[in-house]
Image: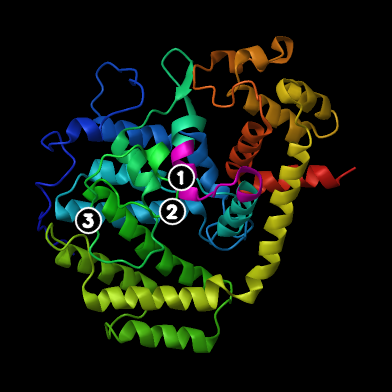
Amino acid sequence: MSINNAKFINEAATPAHPDWEKLTARQEPLYSKQNDCRNAFERDYTRILHSLAYRRLKHKTQVFFNIENDHICTRMEHVSHVESVSTTIAKDLGLSVELTRAIAIGHDLGHAPFGHQGERELNALSKQYLGKSFFHEKNGLHFVDDIELLEDDYRIFRNLDLTYAVRDGIISHCGEVDENGLRPRKEYIDLTADYNEVGRYAPYTWEGCVVKLSDKIAYVGRDIEDAIRLKFLSRENIDSLTDLARAYDKNAINTTVIIHNMIYDVCRNSSPERGVCLSETFFEQLKEVKDFNYKYIYRNKRLEPFTQYAKVVIGQLFAVLLDAYRGEETLSELRRQAEIYPELMGAFAGWLSKYCDPACNLFDNTDAKTVKCCNRKIYGRLETENVYVQAILDYISGMSDNYAIKVFNELITY
């Protein structure tokens, strides 16, 4: 399929790029490794690959909550599809495959349990208690900046400290807006302070633009396959989808062919002048397929029981954890309540202690791993309830579906 046009080779994120130092800048220096043959973006890729947040994606809902069905797409599989689509495009256009892969593998680390249903519930809670929105793109940046920890060569846990270009690609990947001809922004912004609404900025790199478009190409196709497998679509729905595909390509008979055609179309039509884009023909098809998905899949009435279930689970976990707030004595209270809810309260106390000022801890009850954490203590001494609410939102958003259900069941089992 390759066109091998390499039209973006002079725009690629390589050492020859005029902003290379900005692209590879980290919040803190990353410890060095002797005889390391990886560049900065390859190190980011493997750091994300080894993170716990990435591992949990295999038990997080993409669209359909079906934890017993091995053939339904999970969040991790979706990430793999985006990586496949985006790196194929980046390689053909002459962009940095290493940066593209790193953004792709990390782009959904901030997703809540139960997919977008869980995200909506956390957003409602965040607005109610903190007066700000929760969206998974910014939560992904928060996770790679502040939450995820990795051991260094001396068994000390530290923050991931990813490069600016990868962090930017994660928070800028929103693929919900219908736009063609993606181009990187010119401003080198403070991602944490300036990015307060979803989709506010274009990515800073061409590689980030590729991932943003690839995200949409990947999910619209695979979501249809799962909907057919779970019988969400009627024969009439499937026939209309086939007619839609063949209106643009008479040989298109399934979503794999549609995705293949879109990848080829992006490679053929993109240029530094036009941006990363589809032809008008295939851009219209992508919009029509997306509209089809919203009408017959994402707004399908069969998803309503799952939506309500996700709301109950997340809402109850939040309420029970919030009730344990005692200011600087919260960790002590959580450990006391662990006698009743050993998994929810005990695990939360251990997790929370890693991000609190050591002076806030009860040293005789401190997890042994906590003293080996040289990370940013983002919750301080839990001086305010708002700080604690943020901690609860962080903890729940990082849960897998399975784990959220496990600790919820602990609440209703006497």
Dividing the image into 4 quarters, which one contains the C terminus?
A: top right
Dividing the image into 4 quarters, which one contains the N terminus?
A: bottom left
Q: Residue at x 34, y 82 (%)?
A: 245
Q: Is residue 108 placed above or below 386 in the rendered structure?
A: below
Snapshot quadrant of residue 323? top right
Which kind of residue does numbered mark 3 sit on?
Arg
Determine contact: label 3, label 1, CB under 8 Å.
Answer: no
Disc 3 is placed on an element classified as loop
* In magenta stretch: residue 118: no
Which sits earlier in the primary sequence, circle 1 or circle 2? 1
Q: Check disc 1 and report the residue beneath it.
A: 138
Q: Check disc 2 and report the residue beneath it.
A: 198
Disc 1 is placed on an element classified as helix
For the record, the magenta segment spans 127-142
Q: Check disc 3 and report the residue beneath it.
A: 183
Disc 2 is placed on an element classified as loop
Q: In this view, does 27 lie to the left or right of 328?
A: left
Q: Main secondary structure of the magenta part?
A: helix
Residue 251, position as x, y percentages in the image? 28, 83
Q: Residues within 10 Å of mark 3 (few under 14, many from 20)?
A: many
Q: Residue at x 34, y 18 (%)?
A: 31
The residues tagged by marks 3 and 1 sit, at their Cα atoms, a distance apart of 20 Å
Residue at the front extreme of this rendering: 131
Determine contact: label 1, label 2, CB under 8 Å.
Answer: yes
Q: Residues within 10 Å of mark 1 (few under 14, many from 20)?
A: many
Q: Is residue 79 left or right of residue 344?
A: left
Q: How crowded is mark 2: few (under 14 residues within 10 Å), some or many (20 or more)?
A: some
Q: Is residue 120 left or right of residue 184?
A: right
